[in-house]
Amino acid sequence: MPSASVDPSVSRDPIPLDAEDLATVCVLCSHNCGLRVDVAAGRIAKVRADERNPITHGYVCNKGFSIARYVEHDERVEHPLRRRPDGTFERISWDVAIAEIAGKLGRIRDEHGGRAFALVGIGGQGNHMDGPYGLGWLRGLGSKRWFNALAQEKTQHPLIQGWMFGSSPATFFHVDQPRVKYLLVMGTNPRISNRGHNANEFFKEYAEDPERTMVVADPRETETTRAADRHLRVRPGSDVYLLLGMAAAIVQNGWEDAEFVAGRTEGFDAVREALAAVDPAAMAARCDVPARDLLDTAREFAEADGAGFFFDLGVEQNRFSTLISYLIHLITVLTGNAGRKGGAIFMETIAPPVVDPDRVSEPERALASGIPAIRALGNAGMFSPSLFPEEVLIDHPERIRAVVVEGSNPLLSFSDAARWREALAALDLVVVVDPAMTETARLADYVLPTPTGYEKWEMAIFPKGWPEVSVQVRPPVVPGPPEALPEPEIYARLVEALGPFGEPPEALFELGETATTDPGAAMRWLATAREKAAEAGENAMIFWAYRTIGPHLPAPSLAGVWAQCQLNGLMRRESVVRELGPAFADENPFALGNEIFRRILEHPEGVAIARADEDDPLGPHLGHPDGKVRLAPEAVLPEIGRALDAPPGDDDAWPFVLAAGLRTRWTANTIQRDPKWRKGRGPHCTLNLSPEDAARLGVEDGDAVRLETSRGAAELPATLDPKLRPGHVWVPNGFGMIHSSPEGDVAVDGVNLNELTDTADRDPFTGIPHHRYVPCRVTAAGR
Ligand code: SF4
């Protein structure tokens, strides 16, 4: 069978060029549906849903069939590139690239210290193998300045959960989808966005079940609201008042679960006091929904036999998003639905849910705003990308001076592209690691090619399911460009060139030969590495594992997965044994770690490695010394007053509210670069507005309109959308990408909405931008 030999950092074995029924995933959204692909002549030829995937069970949406377009397009980077003084790029060797970048990093470190470095990115949608290596590189150099896309969406939740539950940031508090009876959906249209588990299928079945109730709060009429038992057609930006009204109604009417509140929580009096001044009817008026509907929703939620919230960016990237998160958690706890089957449970990932004893220590903070790095998906803290430009442009001796951008395209994905361009131009060094020549890569000093998530070993760490904890690690299915190197190899080469950890201790090489199969060798490897890392720095261990265990694995990057498996054996023993079965009850932690590693490699379609305690879904996650939930975290209560003082008002200067970047059936963030992947009827990048607004502006379907914000303006075609409230407009995400044809023609597909957003328009606790509430003006173009 023909095969392609690849760099050993990609795969020790050659990659077959013709093969059938290979297990992989779709990386176009965080759902990571299991797929099976057939490969012909080294290219993805056929794609189908994977019925054998234990997580998604054959679920797929239209986008999954287009993954070959993510692999093959005209913007692939195939060689290390260096910018010339005239802005063009020249091909260089890996040795030259690593030596020059390491030399520049070393000089910056010597002059300004390690904090001068930042890492922007880590992981595309389902490409997370780089995580421990990227963070190990950054921390090994002495910096914790990590900016990640999750922190422009969801870090308010682990922040609130830490305050209220003392829970591990590695958990994901989520509605127990299969068992919930009463669902309040906010800020999402999962029938289209695929938010949640097998969303389209789930919401269809849920709506048909007479035993279950769904209320949807959404300014728009959507595929999801149409099937709802009640549609609360809230005014854009007023979700916080709906939740304030509901929380006040529950407390003022005594609808809380008194037994749960008395036994498992503290701070109820402070909550009652804070909500005393909140009038549910006045809150309903702010939302523009009937007061009766708000009160009924609050009462029904409290009385339901298992209720939960289902929410996404519409409330997460909106006004008062941290307060919104708090109120969602508060209502869930007050009604006895926290840590309850059919309510909300703590989903877990391969990272064991350990509460870092350091969690109460002062976090790393941004220099300009003081906003903290927030721990999410694990114990490493991440900053909102909205904070990055000012951390570069600030006049401060510890400002950021060099950045590695990896698995991320800030110029399109993060607020305020103009401010990002200004910041990148002010840096001493910009290195982009990416499979594609992105808009950000075009501004870099060096561009380093890496394989896509189908051309190297990869994994997705997003939480999937409950009580099982499932993991999917997948081998490459097609070869990538011969010079593309996986991110772990790039970080390892940079670390070795800079030398913060030195050579791996000699003993680790011999132990590494059998560490993944012999529990005794695993134990001795970890003990020796830990002892030596006490001098070299704890981040040395991941790179030592890469160089000493990695060569004995199908790809060296898998050493990071092995290390995670060992942490599972050591720190999540009971859950692991629950999944593996009683035969493993007496095994030592290293045997457990090696066993789940073996199962992961044996099951590229995914496999469960641990199982949460179904009899006690709450207790193990309560980390405060008294084991009680804090209902009234001090920091967040004053936010109630700020929200009450700032109703969404009519602003004559900016009379419209833009929901910037909604998902459609034909958007995939900025992953799919070639517009040819869209087979739906176009145009795709249009401004959607209500027929009432269109009539007032004298605009018809397809006419050009001008969209203007405080940061910029763009022209695009109009689509009349009768499902919108007047004053509310939206544009899909994932546009504004440069693409070129084989003939060398360069074009831009649609509008980059982040030319119109503002880094300053953000939540004060997290820095999460208000992309779903962008004040704007819309006019007919050319008038
Ligand atoms: S884009 Fe569609 S197929 Fe791909 S992971 Fe998301 S829901 Fe699944």
Image: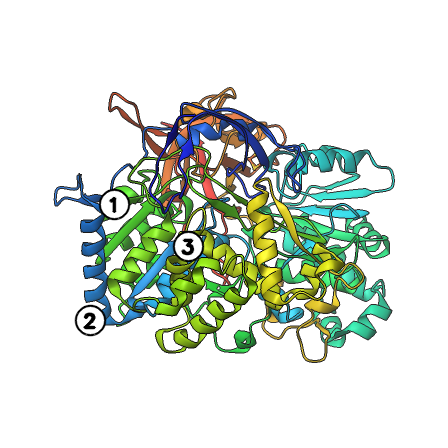
Which image quadrant is residue 269 in?
bottom right
Dot 1 amino acid type: Leu
Q: Nearer the viewer, residue 305 or 471?
A: 471
Separation (CA) of disc 3 from disc 1: 34 Å
| Quadrant location, the C terminus | top left
The residue that mark 2 highlights is 111
Percent position of residue 508, x then y: 40, 66
Helix, strand or loop at mark 1: helix
The residue that mark 3 highlights is 550
Dot 2 amino acid type: Glu
- Disc on the earlier residue, 2 or 1: 2
216, above or below 40, in the image:
below
- Checking the image for residue 648, the label placed there is none
Percent position of residue 463, x then y: 61, 51
Q: Nearer the viewer, mark 2 or mark 1?
A: 2
**Label 2 crowd bin: few (<14), some (14–19), many (20+), radius 10 Å:** few
Residue most toward the left? 85
74 left or right of 426? right
Separation (CA) of disc 2 from disc 1: 24 Å
- Disc on the earlier residue, 3 or 1: 1
The residue that mark 1 highlights is 443
Q: Nearer the viewer, residue 327 or 435?
A: 435
Which image quadrant is residue 282 in?
bottom right
Percent position of residue 196, x then y: 65, 44
